[in-house]
Image (cartoon, helix red, strand yellow):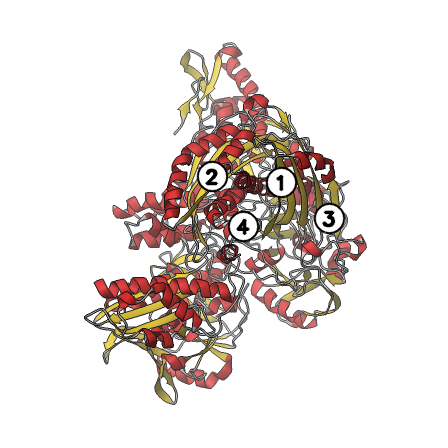
Amino acid sequence: MKPAPFEYHAPNTVADAANLLAELGDGAKVLSGGQSLVPMLALRLAVFEHLVDIGRIAELSGIERRNGALWIGAGTTQATVEASALVASEVPLLAVATPLIGHFQIRSRGTLGGSIAHADPAAEYPAVALALDATMEVVSPRGRRTIEARDFFAGLWSTSMEPDELLVGVSFPIWGGRSGFAVEEFARRHGDFAIAGAAIGIELDAVDRIRRCTLGLIGLGSTPERARTVEAELAGRPVTDVEPDEVGRLVMAALPSVPSDLHGSAAYRKRVGAAMVARAWTTAAAEARHG
Amino acid sequence: MGEVSVKLTVNGQPRAATVEPRVTLADFLREQLQLTGTHLGCEHGVCGACTVLVDGAAVRSCLMFAVQADGAEVTTIEGIGSPDGGLSAVQSAFRDCHGLQCGFCTPGFVVSVTAFLRDHPNPTDPEIREALSGNLCRCTGYQGIVNAVQQAAGAARRGELR
Amino acid sequence: MTERAADGGARYAGARVHRVEDDRLLTGRGTFVDDVSLPGMLHACFVRSPIARAAIQRIDTSAALALPGVRFVFTAADLNPGVREQWHTTIGKEMPETPRPPLAEGEVRFVGDPVALVVAESRYLAEDAAELVEVDYEPLPAVVDYTEAEHAKALVHESHGSNVIAQLTTVPASAFDEVFASAAHVASETIYQQAYAPVPIEGRGLVVDYSSVTGDLTIHASTQTPHEVRLFCSRLLGMPEERVRVVTRDTGGGFGQKVMVQRDEMCLMLAGPVVGAPLKWVEDRRENLLAAGKSRQEHAAVKMAFDADGAIQAAYIDFVQDCGAYPTPWPLFPAAAVGTFFPGPYRVPRGGFAVKTLYTNTVGRAPYRGPWQFESLAREVLLDIAARQMHVDPAELRRRNLLRRDELPYKNPNGMNYDNISPLETFEQALAMLDYAKFRAEQAEARSAGRYLGVGLANYVEASTPGYGVYGTEPATIRIAPTGRITVYVAGGSSGNSIETTVVQLTADALGAKIEDVDTVQGDTAVTGFGAGTAGSRSGSMTAGAVRETAAVLRERILAIAAHELGVAIEDIELADSRASVRAKPAVGVSFKDLAALADAPAGLEASARYTANSPSIWVNATHVCTCEVDVATGRVQLLRYIVSEDCGPMINPNVVEGQIAGGTVQGIGGVLFEHLAYDDDGNPVATTFMDYLLPTAAEVPAIEFGHIETPSPGPGGYKGVGEGGAIGAPPAVVNAVADALSPFGVKITRLPLGPSQIVALLDR
């Protein structure tokens, strides 16, 4: 089980990386932490003529406040995100999601940007990015632009980035006020991709009415999903009146199509998804109310 | 698709070599540096038998190309023991607790546990099991391994991990 | 760490001594087959069929051969004619066999079937070349579902004329119609077990090193049976056996999968002498899950009749097994064992069985730890179903039927003659360890709070240490060098089961030596006598016999020389701490080192002997008890406590005993809750990576608690075999625990695996 040959490129700047991607075209693939890409190469499920290793680009790493949001460089490892006090205080949903990614040896190498650009619907970061309305910052030789999360995830393992665009950073909005966050996942074993999961944030007003909530879903579609209609229905209601099981049912009823595989049918995933939504809702609501 | 040169430090020794870019760090260590203690159990990042330390962090050496380790400091199972050839606290604990049978997965467990206890010298039982979940063992049923981590945690708390 | 024996010497048997294997394995200094690197060595990779069944129209190797660094591409036409004989020493030449061409000839019969063998300068290049081998396949109808194989139009092996490999009926089920018709209670179910596999973390592998100058063939092998590999190879190639040497240092797990020589290994043996350099093949994980063999995958219609008091009146099993396209070995005897052992450690006055083995276009069946464990799964699951039907507690139903010591020896209706077992004792010990009554109270309380706890019980008796044919014999050589070092040579085949430590412990005890003076050499056929390796839970008892016989010869010589040297009678000499000394005058003595120098310098003292087993098998029994909680929203099963009480006789090393039980138990847990070597309807395997074939991790398994009852066997030291039992007892215990947890929902479990989606489907039914 050995990868096919490829040409290796290790640019030192974002500009060089973007130029390389433009120059090499379709035969090139960005190598970030490699924790999803290298298995596919080893199994020869994917073959590329060129790998552009962005691991040596210093400007891709970092966690900082920018324009009222928390900016995280695409090359920042998941282990760094996990250990960041800034992430824990400013984007708690990202902090609770991170330990659920694979195993600590995977998080040592796996990067935030790699996970989001890989756009696996069963992965944690794409769902969190979608749930929080994160903004992706991408660079190509044509310049820099931003893509909203809702426009970013285009399909199974595909995004709206152009082939010559490189994801350089992700900005996560910072929620203030009385808010609570939770991620609940159901996986066959500890560290496996989730069969179904939910990433939920709830903000309450002073009298426990839902000011806003976000319902991100993991493993329940060909992209990460979000139950926006249900969010709108719940907004304004007193959180104490909302039955978590009801949220689970509403969210599953609103889902378009759900995948099936060896580990579970679509119906099974919906059942588990409803339970995960209910559990995450319970935890997030309690945190929002009681801090 | 030519070879590229890499320079890195392995178990404290500077090493330089040329290598095809597609060669994984695991194969590079095993084939070119003859450090065969790093084992390959799946080559797709699940079993953990190939775990090594890269700049101190436990990583799957099958999910990394040797060229990506250029400039890095790598520690393999061969570099985990005491410099005098004795066993480290983690290795001794595995021996004391019958934490290995065939020994094939063992290097990956020892390296992973060494990194885990360095960062978490006071783990709870669920934390230990969660930390071990990135390494597969087919012989022991994990009983001796969990016991070994509990024993070695004592050494970690006393700062006697290595 | 050790206790003093009556004769004053250290006694290591029974102690938790450190393993002699550990220092090298813990420091990365073991030698597994992939660690063997020889000058000029070439690397092999198989081209495997992507189709379940197809005719091979054409194979074009030219593009592969044109790739720089590629030396050979072999097809069936190149390798298969080299086969002289192919049969296993442990099975015998006269036994029936299934077809086993090294490379596929004319037709591929499962996804993964080896079609060509590429030899190149590196494994990377060999894989590049394998992609360039063009094979034109004409797909043929495949037999995928074994339950339809018997009546399928398509035949897996046209030459066999049927998809039924072999079948056997001892007594037809109708012979018991009257018993069942008049019984107070009858339980009858069809129980299914899915395919799962041994999955050692190290795959199979060989380095074949042939010298055209001397004609010597050396094979470095990942195997449980180095001597079998040697003899098989010599017959396969028609080479004198003394020209073939097999060397095995460390083997990364086997669990049965590395007992037999399969087609892939045959290809390497055939190609090795042709390629002009040492040739390595190390199976990767995908190959292991595609082609190393499956196990389990079977079902049976089982029924039991009970009288009004719950006493079993009769038990019958009609068993059907999927053997894939190329089973190794011929499957009828292992299948028949499911029938013979079905009555288990219970009082069963009447019974019989029918078994049927079938070909399908899936990977062939291969041995796996507890090859016939289905007998326990079917029986114990049926007993729980019966208890529920009869409104009797499952513990009570078992208690009424378990064999008591005073009934032994006991011959079951299928001819198995149990003795030296303690099923009622292990059962009561395990229940006491759990505090069964207390658990039932907790369970009732949890249920009223909407939580579903369950307890599962399972008893089994297994035949360890086969005493027939070449299994029934094991040699050892012990040498005391003039340096004082003692080396014990045994056949070996350790694949994690600590045989090195075991023979070192036993040799030290048998000679009265210090354990640190004893080394062992194993796994090299050039310096050890034939032994059948690790299989059938035989290593402990058989090597104990070999060491006992050999050490007895050596002791006599030591005593004679020492008596002469010290000027006393032989009866006045005692051996301890690597010294012969005068009884009652411990200061007067002579060290083994000096005795070896006296004996025959520089050769030292040496003896060889062979032990022959005195019984056809050694019975061993155990009880597994586990508790679980089932999350009815998701179907997740969380195991809470896991208790094994076993009777393996005296323990040579409790660490090793418990380690074997724990490892087998977790394999059984994995088999019920996680593992599935699944195929889709077209015969494509869908679990060919560790992302799809789910081995349990430390986070999924509970702490295992051990209880021990000690009934000595009639074998050496009273020891019994304990390697396989965990994998036998665990599956029914786990199934019964889940079924018990879900009993308020009226759920009946008769089909595995029990993944969360299957559990939810049961709840929704």
| Residue type, numbered disc 4 | Pro
Badge 1 density bin: few <14, some 14–19, many ≥20, Cα 10 Å: many
Q: Which residue is mark 2?
A: C625
Q: Is residue C40 above or below residue A199?
A: above
| Residue A262 picture quarter | bottom right
Residues indicated by labels 1 and 3 sit on the same polypeptide chain: yes
Give the residue drawn at x 27%, y 65%.
A240
In the rendered view, would you say C717 is above or below C221? Answer: above
Which residue does the image show at 54% across and 20% down from the upper left? C555
> Does residue B139 show up?
no
Secondary structure at numbered mark 2: strand
For the residues labelled 1 and 3, say whether their Cβ atoms are less than 8 Å apart. no
Residue at mark 3: chain: C
Alpha carbon distance from label 3 to label 4: 26 Å
Q: Which mark is residue C525?
A: 1
Q: CA distance from mark 4 to mark 2?
A: 26 Å
Residue B84 image-quadrant placement: top left
Inter-mark Cα distance, 4 to 1: 23 Å
Say which residue appears at 38% left-offset and 51% top-offset: C450
- Determine whether, in the image, residue B110 is placed left or right of residue A204: right
Left/right of residue C729 with respect to residue A70 in the rendered view: right
**Which mark's residue is nearer the viewer, 4 or 2?**
2
Element assignment for label 4: loop
The residue that mark 3 highlights is C236
What amino acid does circle 1 point to? Answer: Thr
Q: Nearer the viewer, mark 4 or mark 1?
A: 4
